[in-house]
Image (spheres, rainbow, N blue to C red):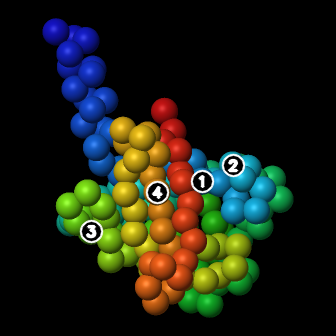
């Protein structure tokens, strides 16, 4: 019975974007940060909990909003995502490296072990994708 409970809890975890995710640098494909995604009132958001790239700037110097000059660790970079069938849409993501804010959609892939994130300006076709890996 205990085994079934553990398997069921794991299945519930993998069908939601909530949890800790390892992000990767677009150019080097090396681990960049750990982001924790949580839910409040039906909206999902993500906060940087740890920087993994030793060359990453510890503050968001290129940000143009209230996050300018603030530490990246503890910063909310993903906001406003709403569950929509098998994806999450309607949100925004900040790239602390360039200070740009993009529209964002995400969906779980690989049985919930990976997160496919599409960041774009205007329409999704004009954007870039990243795959984040669920942290255990």
Residue 97 coordinates in the image, percent (x, y): 70, 73
Instruction: Return the mark for residue 23.
Output: 1
Q: Which type of secondary structure does the marked residue at label 1 adopt?
A: strand
Question: With 106 as the anchor, is 3 left or right in this view?
Answer: left
Residue 95 coordinates in the image, percent (x, y): 61, 73
Q: Residue furthest front?
A: 125
Question: Disc 4 designates what residue?
Answer: 116
Question: Disc 3 designates what residue?
Answer: 82
Q: Which type of secondary structure does the marked residue at label 3 adopt?
A: strand
Q: Are marks 4 and 2 in contact (CB under 8 Å)?
A: no
Residue at the image position 51 percent from the left and 48 percent from the top? 21
**Displayed quadrant of residue 15:** top left
Q: Are marks 2 and 1 in contact (CB under 8 Å)?
A: yes
- Is residue 41 something one can see in this rendering? yes
Q: Say few, some or many: other residues with alpha carbon within 10 Å of mark 1 (under 14 / 14 to 19 / 20 or more).
A: many
Given residues 119 and 31, the one toward you in this image is 119
**C-alpha distance separating marks 4 and 1:** 11 Å
């Amino acid at each position: 019975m205990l085994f079934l409970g553990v398997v069921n809890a794991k299945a519930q975890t993998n069908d939601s974007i909530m949890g800790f995710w390892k992000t990767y640098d677009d150019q080097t494909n090396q681990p960049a940060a750990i982001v924790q995604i949580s839910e409040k009132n039906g909206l999902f958001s993500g906060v940087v909990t740890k920087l993994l790239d030793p060359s990453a700037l510890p503050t968001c110097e290129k940000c143009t909003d209230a996050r300018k000059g603030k530490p990246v660790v503890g910063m909310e970079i993903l906001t406003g995502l709403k569950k929509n069938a098998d994806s999450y849409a309607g949100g925004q993501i900040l790239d602390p490296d360039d200070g740009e804010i993009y529209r964002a959609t995400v969906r779980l892939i690989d049985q919930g072990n990976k997160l496919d994130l599409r960041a774009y300006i205007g329409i999704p076709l004009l954007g870039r994708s990243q795959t984040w890996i669920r942290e255990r």
